[in-house]
Amino acid sequence: MHSGYWLIASIGLPLIAAAVLLFVPDERHDIVRWLSAGVGAALFAISVFVFFAYELDRGGGFQFFIRWDWLQNTAFLRAHGISLAFGVDGIAAPMVLLTGIVCFGGALISWKIEHHNKDFFILFWVLVAGVYGTFESLDLFFFFFFYEVAVLPMYLLIAVWGSSSTFPTFTRTKEYSAMKLTIMLVSASILIFLGIFAVFQKAGAGTFDLQTLYAVQFDENFQKAVFPLFVIGCGVLAGLWPFHTWSPDGHVSAPTAVSMLHAGVLMKLGAFGIIRLGIQLLPAGATFWMPGLMVLATVNVVYGAFAATAQRDFKYMIGYSSVSHMGLVLMGLATMNTIGIDGAVLQMFSHGVMTATFFAMVGSVYDQAHTRDMTLFGGLVQKMPFFVFFFGIAGLASLGLPGLSGFVAEFNVFVGTFQTYPWAAALGIFAAAITAVYILRMMSMALFGPFNERWASLKEMTYLERGTASLLLGFILFMGLWPAPFVDRISETVRLLPGVS
Amino acid sequence: MTDAWVLPALPVAGFIVLLLFSTWLPRKGDWIAIALMAASFALVFPIARDVALSIGNGNFQGVERSREWLNIPGYIEIRMGTFVDQITLVMLFCVTLIALIVMIYSTGYMRGDKRYGWFYAIVSLFVASMLSLVLADNLLLLYFSWELVGLCSMLLIGYYYDKQTAAEASKKAFITTRVGDVGLLIGIIILFTQTHTFNIQDILRMAEAGEISRQWLTASAVLILAGACGKSAQFPLHVWLPDAMEGPTPVSALIHAATMVVAGVYLVARLLPLFEVVRGMPELITALGLTTTTIAVFCGLAQRDIKRVVAYSTLNSLGLMFVALGSGAVGAAMLYLLTHAFFKALLFLGCGSVIHATEEQEVDKLGGLWGKLPITAPMFVVGALAMAGLVPFSGYWAKDEILVGLYNGNLNSIALIVTMISLPITAIYMARLVMLTFFGTVKDAHVHGHAHESEPAMSWPLLLLGALAVVSGFVVFEGVGKALGFHSGFLGFIFNAAEGPETFSVNWGLAVGSVALVVTGLGLGTWMWWGDAEPSKRAAAFSPLLYRLFYNRFYIDEVYQFAIDKIVLATGRVVAVFDRAVVNDSGVNGAGETASFLGWLGKYQQTGKIPNYALAIVIGIVVIFAVAFGYRT
C-alpha cells in the first residue's frame, strides 16, 4: 500500500466521522461517544505509526508523500497547480503525533458533555481534520484551506459549549471570547493570504506546490517585504505579543476539550506556519527579521510569566503561562540555529502535551466545583490525590524540571539562544524562575495546605480522566527521559532548513 | 568501579515499586526500600577497594564510564555516565550509610503514618538522585539530579501538606534554591557554548589550560557558585533551610543535614580547579561562608525550636565548609563533610527521638529529660560536643584541619580570626540546647511526665551514629587510613591537586587555642542555662534589641518577603492590569470599536431619500469624468 494513504486517513477519518455523526439520532449520546472514542483511538494509532515509521536514514526530507492533482494546466495554473499534496518531514512528524495524542485525549475528556454532544463532536472532528491537514499539506492553497478549517469551528465550540465568567473587576462572556478569537485569527489570516499570493505571483511557476516554491530563489527585498506578513499572520495564532489576548480569554471561556486542542495543537499551527511559510520559503527574509522576532519573543516569555503570577483563575494562569511558553518556541525559531529550532519544535510538542494535561485537570475540578478561582480551594490533595499528582507533574514540567519534557525543550532553546543572543537566554531562564513562583504559588494555595471544608463533596477524577491524564503524562515522561526519538527526527530536518546555521 | 551506575539504579527500582504497589505490600513495602538501600551501601565497598588499589598504583585521576544519550552529528553529542574518584567515594559512603540508617530509624518514627509508603518511595527517589548527582560525569546529568533532589526535598518538606506552614516552607525551599539554579543552568550553558562539552573533567582541563575566555569563565563560575549557594544554603540564599524543618525529622537528618545540603559543597569541591583559575573567586567563596557562619551562630543562640537550633548549626557547618573550600583545603572540607554527616544526622535523629518521646519541640517546654531518655540524651550530648568541636570528637579533627588550611592558605588572616570567634559561640548555643533540653528545671510537667525512651529501631541508629561521631575523625591519622586499606590518611587521600597530598600534623598553637575557645564556650553556655537559666535571662534582658535581632534571623526573611510581595508579585499585577486595560481593552477592543464607529458614521449615507442618492450619483459621475479627462490631458 502507498504509505501516503496513512496521511489521507488521518485527515479523512475525522471528516468521515463528522459526516457519519450527522446521521446519528440526536438523543443517542452513547453512539456519539463510542464512535468518537473509536475515531480518537484510531487517529492516535495512525499518528503513533506515522511518527515512528518516519525513517531516519533518508535525510530528513518529506516522507509518506502523496499527491492528488486537483487543478492544473488551466487558466494561470501550470503543472500541479493546486493539488492535494501531503507529506511529513521531521518537524511535522512530532506535530502529527501531538495531534493524535491531544485529539484522543480531548475525545475522552468530552465524554461527559451532555448538551448537544453530537454537534459538539461534529465540529470537533472537523477542527481535528483541519489541524492534520495543515501539518501535512505540501500545497500552499490547501495549507491555507486547512488552516482556516482548523480555526473556524472554534467560534461555535466556544460560543455554544463554553462558559462565561464573572471576575471582581470585569466579566468575560463566551460570546465575546469566541468573537475576539475568531476576528483576530481571521484578520491575521488575511496577512497570510496576501503573503501566499505574493509568493505565488513572484515565483511565476503557476503552482501552489510548496516543494516547487522552496526551490525558487526569491530576491532579497521581496523576501524582506513578505516575511513579516507570514510571521505576524502565523504569529497571532502562536500567541505572539502583543497579539496574544485572544488566547487567555479564549481558554477561560472554552470547554475543556477545546482548551486542550486550542493550547495543545492550535497554537502550534502558528509556530509551524512560521517554519513552513516563513523560514522555508523566505530564508533571507527570516535572517533579516529574526532579531525583531527575538525581541518580541523575549517579551512574550517574560511578560507571560509575570502576568501569570497575578492570576487567580486556573485557566487564566495557564493561559498566560502558554503565552510565556509559546514565547520560548518563538525564541527558539528566532535563533536561526539548529539547536534553537530543534528546541522550538521540542517545545511545541512538550507544551502541547503539558498544557493539554493542565486543561484536562482543570476541567475535572471545574465540572464539579463550578469555579476556577484558586484562592477558594485549599488542600485538594486530601480529596483528589490523583488529580494533584497529574496536575503537579504538569506543573513541574511547566517549570522545566529535568526528567520531564519541558526541560529538554527549554534547554535546547536556551543553548541555541545563548549562542546568538545571550541576553535573551538569560531573561528566558529568569522567566523560568518566575514560572516556579506562579506554579508553586498555585500549588500551595489550591492543592496543599489546610483543607477547605466547602469542597467536602468533591470526588476524585473519573477513571476515564485518569486514563486520559496517564496517556498525556506518559508522553511528558517519554520525552523528558528519552528525547532521542524526537531530537533525531527534528534535527534531521532542521539542518536542511535554508538559512539555518 | 565502572558499574557504579548500579548504586542509584537500586533505589530507583525501590521508588517505582513503592510508588505503584506500596498500598498492597505488607508493611507498605518499607522492607523493599531498606533492602535495596542496604544493597546499595554494600556495593560501595567494592568501589572503595578498587579506588584504594588504583591509588596505590600511582597517578589516579578517577574512572569514567559513559554511553551516548543524544547525538546530532556535527552539532552536539551528549554522553551520560559516571565518574568515580576519591571525592565521589566519600560522598557515596556518606549518602548510602546515612540513608540506610535513616530508613531504619524511620520504621519507628514514621510508624502508623497514613502516607508511610509514599514516604519510603520519595526517600528512595531522593537517594537515587543524590547518588547520581555525585556520580555524574557531566554537568547535564548533574543538573538533572540536582533538580530532582530539590524536588524530593520539596515533597518531603511539604510531607505534612495539610499544615499551611509546611506547604509554605516547601514552596519557599523550592523557589529559593531555584533562584540559585537559574544561575547554575546559565553557568552550565555558558561552559557548554565555550567548550562544546558537558563533561566535567574535559571542562576542568580546558579551564586550567586557559582555553576558555576569561570573561565567560568568570561569569560561569559566579553563576555556578550561585547554584551551589542555593542548594547549600549559603548567604544570601540560606533562608529556606531553617523553614525546611517542617518536614519529618528523619528527612531533616538525611536531606537537610547530611546529604542534599552538602551538594553545593560537593559541586564547588568538584569544580575547584575551575574556581581557582578565576581571580577573586576563592575570596568570594570564603566571604560567603564566613557570612553564613556568622549569621548562623548568632541566630542559633536565640531560637526556641529544638530543630531550628540544629538547623542553624547546619548553616554554621556549611559555612565552615565553604570557608575551607575558599582557602583551597579540599581535604579539610571533605573531612568536615564526612564527620558532619554523622554528628549532624545524630543530632537530628536525637531531636526526632526527643520529639517522638515528648511530642514537643519548643525548648522552653522541655527540660530535665536526661534520666528519662537514657540513650537519646548521652548520644545527643556526643553529637553536640562533636558539633562544638571538642577534642577528641570527630568534629574537632575536621574543624582543626580547616583552621590549619586557613592558617597556611594565602587568604587574609581576617578569615581565620572570624572563624576562631565563631567557635566559642557555636559551643555556647550547643551547650544551651543540651542544657535546656536534658538538664535544667522541668518546665512542663505533663510533657516531662509522659516522656519515654524510643524503641530499638530508633535507638540503635542513634548508638551507631554516636559511635561514628566519636571515631570518624580519626581517619585523618595515617595509621587509621592504612588500617582501612588505603595508602594514607584522609588528607593524603583527598587533596587539592595544585598542592598535592598532605600528611597530618598538629599545629599546636591552633589546636590549643581552638580547644580553649571551645571549652570556654561550653563552660559559659552551661553556666548561663544551668537550672533556671537565670544568667541567660539577664543577658537577653540586657539587650532586648539584640535578642530580637537574633531571634528574627536578622530580618532577612522579611526583606525577601517584601521583595517578593512588593516587586515580583506587584510587577505581575501591573503586567496583568496592563494586559487587560491597555493591550486588550484599548488595543484589541479599541480596534473593534473604531471599526464599528466608522460603520456607524457610514450608515448615515443610507438616508432613504431619492434626491440624496441622485446627488451622489451626479457627483460621482462628475468626479469620474474629471479624473478621466484630467488623466488624458
Image: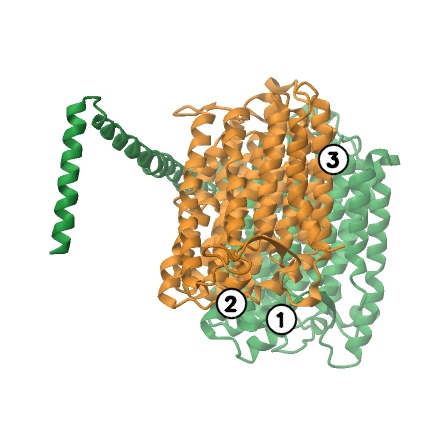
Image side of residue B64 versus residue A411, left or right: right
Of tags 1 and 3, the one toward the viewer is 3
| Element type where label 2 sits in the image | helix
Q: Is residue A239 left or right of residue A102?
A: left
Which scheme is used to colour this image of the protein?
by chain
- Name the quadrant of the N terminus of chain B: bottom right
The chain letter for the residue carrying disc 3 is: A
Residue B209 higher or lower than B439, as above or below: below
Which residue does the numbered mark 3 point to in the structure image?
A: A38
Disc 1/disc 2 C-alpha distance (Å): 79 Å
x then y, percent, for residue A153: 53, 34
Q: Of the residues shown, which amino acid type is indicated by label 1?
A: Asn
Question: How busy is the neighbourhood of tag 3: few (under 14 within 10 Å), some, or many (20 plus)?
Answer: some
Q: Is residue A418 visible?
A: yes
Identify the disc placed on residue B507: 1
Question: Residue pushed farthest right?
Answer: B26
Q: Secondary structure at mark 1?
A: loop
